[in-house]
Amino acid sequence: PPDVNTLGRATWTFLHTTAAYYPPTATPAQQSSMRALIHAVGEFYPCTWCAKDFRDRIAEHAPDVSGRAGLSTWMCERHNEVNKRLGKEVFDCARVMERWKDGPAD
Ligand code: FAD
């Protein structure tokens, strides 16, 4: 099975960076593509219990695919739910663009 921590860091990097570079205002076609991408993560993420939890979270909080700011905040909140569950520090979502817009620091 994959290393859940390495996979997680790589996946959050992809998801937050993709949200940070998503169009400021997404067209309906872009919104449905992004919705499909998020659902596909829930379907294919190769940590099965992580994927199940992500599907539950998506069902509770519909993805905000309206544009960059909304999607970045939505993604940050979902990541924070995982952080809390794992006893990790909660991230200040006001800093999400600063963290991810110019690429990860690490
Ligand atoms: P990560 O949590 O991977 O974070 C990487 C970097 O992102 C941090 O250094 C920080 O700079 C930044 N960051 C932190 N929080 C936020 C935030 N809220 N918004 C924006 N940026 C932030 N692991 C499990 O053990 N069990 C699970 O059920 C589980 N579910 C997961 C579900 C998904 C969809 C994903 C992508 C990962 C999941 N993981 C799960 C992995 C877990 O979230 C971490 O990636 C892993 O534990 C490694 O943590 P880390 O401390 O290296 O930092």
Image (cartoon, grey):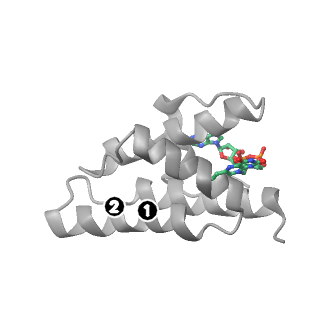
The N terminus, quarter of image? bottom right
- Label number found at residue 60: none
Residue drawn at 23 percent across, 49 percent down = 66
Residue 104 visible in this rendered orientation of the protein: no
- Nearer-the-camera pick, 97 or 55: 55
**Quadrant in the rendering for residue 2:** bottom right
Please name the residue shown 60% across and 47% down the image. Answer: 53
The residue shown at (50%, 42%) is: 57
Residue at image mark 1:
39
Q: Amino acid at mark 2?
A: Arg
Percent from the top left, x then y, of residue 71? 37, 47
Q: Amino acid at mark 1?
A: His
Q: Nearer the viewer, residue 14 or 80?
A: 80
CB atoms of marks 2 and 1 within 8 Å: yes
- With respect to residue 80, does 13 lie above or below? below
Query: Which percent across, then down, holds residue 14?
Result: 56, 63
Q: Which label is found at residue 35?
A: 2
Element under label 2? Answer: helix
Q: x%, y% of residue 10?
A: 68, 63
51 horizontally vs 36: left or right: right
Q: Is mark 1 within 8 Å of ligand 1?
A: no
Graded by Cα atoms within 10 Å as few (under 14), some (14 to 19) or many (20 or more), the crowding at tag 1 reads: some
How far is mark 2 from mark 1, CA to CA? Answer: 6 Å
Q: Position of residue 29 (x, y in %)?
A: 18, 70
Task: Check the image and report above or below for 15 versus 44.
Answer: above
- Looking at the rendered structure, the secondary structure element under dot 1 is helix
Pick out the residue farthest to the left. Answer: 28
Answer above or below: position of 36 versus 97: below
Of residues 43 and 70, the one nearer the viewer is 43
